Amino acid sequence: MKIALLGTRGIPASYSGFETCAEQLGQRLVQRGHEVTVYCRSHHIQYEGEYYKGIRLVKLPTIANKYFDTIAHSFLSSLHALTQNYDIALYFIAGNSPLTWIPKLVGTKTLLNVDGLDWKREKWPAFAKQYIRYSEYLATKLPNLFITDSQVVQTYYRDLYEREPAYIPSGSDVEILSPGETLALFGLEPRKYILFVGR
């Protein structure tokens, strides 16, 4: 299949979880024999190659602005996708939901991976919060399927919109290391401590 990933800053991943997801998912799909394209923001991705880990990179410009960067780039990417005969277009971020109908014009199935409840963050002014909330609603209507990597977000959509996104948790490659010097440095013993990681 021909698969496009849209709505992130692009790869190689250097910023957030969605970029990491695009890179990890993309290379695994390539290994399974699919043709994968990741749309990249030209001002963000410095990698010069046309392919990265077997993934085709399409670098397009955008408006380098906190409020319009994502939607402007996703709109250009959606228009470009109309000419590429993709089977699937996977969008990231609920704020891109208003664009998920565009590839459907040429028969491409669209999916949307919604993020957390971004409208609750203090960084967004009132108009942006309203847009994000409306985009959440459209996420339940416009793409062929919407998904989440959070059971909390899944419950939120089910309770508020009476639509339940498919839950697909993010994975990771975890290397098992022997306890060694690091635990000794902190006076810890194997299986007798708790590690909490957050942001």
Image: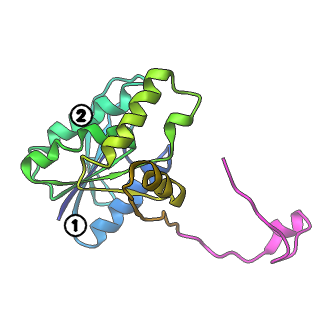
Q: Is residue 9 visible?
A: no
The image position of residue 9, as x and y in percent, is 39, 40
Which of the 4 image quarters holds residue 32?
Answer: bottom left
Q: Is residue 2 left or right of residue 32?
A: left
Region in magenta? 173-199
Q: At 14% from the left edge and 48% from the top edge, which residue is drawn?
A: 104
Kindly state the secondary structure of the residue where label 1 is placed.
loop
Q: Is residue 16 visible?
A: yes
Closer to the camera: disc 2 or disc 1?
A: 2
**Residue flagged by tag 1: what amino acid is it?**
His
Q: At 80% from the left edge and 67% from the top edge, which residue is drawn?
A: 194
Label 2 neighbourhood size at 10 Å, few (<14), some (14-19), many (20+)? Answer: some
User: Disc 2, disc 1: CB below 8 Å?
Assistant: no
Q: Is residue 181 above or below residue 178?
A: above
The image position of residue 149, as x and y in percent, is 47, 59
Q: Is residue 3 above or below residue 116?
A: below
Q: At 49% from the left edge and 57% from the top edge, which residue is drawn?
A: 155
Marker disc for residue 34: 1
Which residue bears the numbered disc 2? 75
The image position of residue 179, as x and y in percent, is 78, 75
Which residue of the protein is positioned furthest toward the right in this rendering?
187
